[in-house]
Amino acid sequence: MDPGSFFASSRVLIVAGKGGVGKTTAAATYATAASRIGHSVLLVEVAGKSAAAPMFEADHRGYEQTVLTDAADGIGEIRTQSLTPDDALIEWLGENGFGRIAKRMARTGILEVVATATPGIKDILVLGKIKQLEVSAAADVIVVDAPAAGQAIGFLQSPVAVLETARTGVINRLGREVAEMVQVGDRCRVSLVTLPEETPVNELIETSFALEDEVGLTLAPVIVNSVLPLIPDLVPVPTRTARGISSAELGDLTAAATLRHERQEMQQDQIARLSGELPLPRIELPQMFGTHLRRAELDQLADALLAGIGSLKEPS
């Protein structure tokens, strides 16, 4: 599939997954890949703080948008914005005629009172802001780093919850507008992220069916993150001993080879199970070694992502 067509399929791409699987890394990789083929990108984080900015060797705090990567020849600009329910509430109140009291209401905890009476209101305010960014074409591609998998279902189900509670009025209208965005495939897709391990794969399979069946979302390819490169014919037990290697060193090498062999077998088993149980295309991203990801590693991951997109079949 042509990467340009892939990113043009919908303006909003929501990235979700179990905590610890590299969801934010996948979102930053999507942003980098889209930028590399000339798209302007807005990377939206909804956890209240920016975990992606350091990967771009940039600093970002607060609600306002920050440029992470400038546009250049053939390269699109990447900006980031952190959204919180309180910030979204202040803006939404201001746009609906309550500008003078908006900040005071947020400071006094009125959102918590409203949230108790209207389930899903916090999430709908954030999704409403994302919908506003989508409608205004704030960027060619809007990548959303969603909450962790369990919370992501509630986050994306919030339009349904709000519509069941608020039957009329401005909240109902906002719920309908957000529902229209998240349930239309050429406006919004969700890409789920996992590791090639049993528990994350189990949760991804459950989440994917829940999002399709209960929310009616369009799912993009699954991202399998941190895949170790295969070493063909890896034998954990040495067939011969090199000169100059002590028994202790040989024991350490054998233990390391055994661990590597077991991980390789495990990840191949889980990838095969994922393919068998979930009828979605997948893209594998290699494991990056080191404690912190930076631009160089993001570029490597973007290369792998673009190659993976290129290997996908064109939609019929």
Image (cartoon, rainbow, N blue to C red):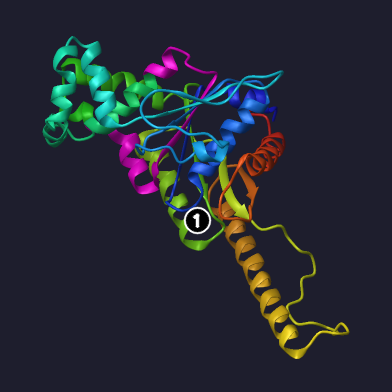
Residue furthest to the top: 97
Residue 14, percent across and down? 46, 33
| 213 relative to 166 in the view: left or right | right
| 189 relative to 245 in the view: left or right | left
Residue furthest to the right: 243
Residue 215 drawn above or below residue 170: below
Q: Which residue is mark 1?
A: 201
Q: Amino acid at mark 1?
A: Val
- Dot 1: what SS? helix
- 108 vs 236, nearest the viewer: 108
- 160 vs 132, nearest the viewer: 132
Residue 285, percent across and down? 63, 47
Density class for disc 1 (Cα within 10 Å; few <14, some 14-19, many ≥20) is many
Residue at the image position 46 percent from the left and 51 percent from the top = 205
On-image quarter of the C terminus: top right
Residue 238, percent across and down? 79, 82
Q: Which residues are magenta?
A: 132-161
Residue at the image position 75 percent from the left and 84 percent from the top = 250
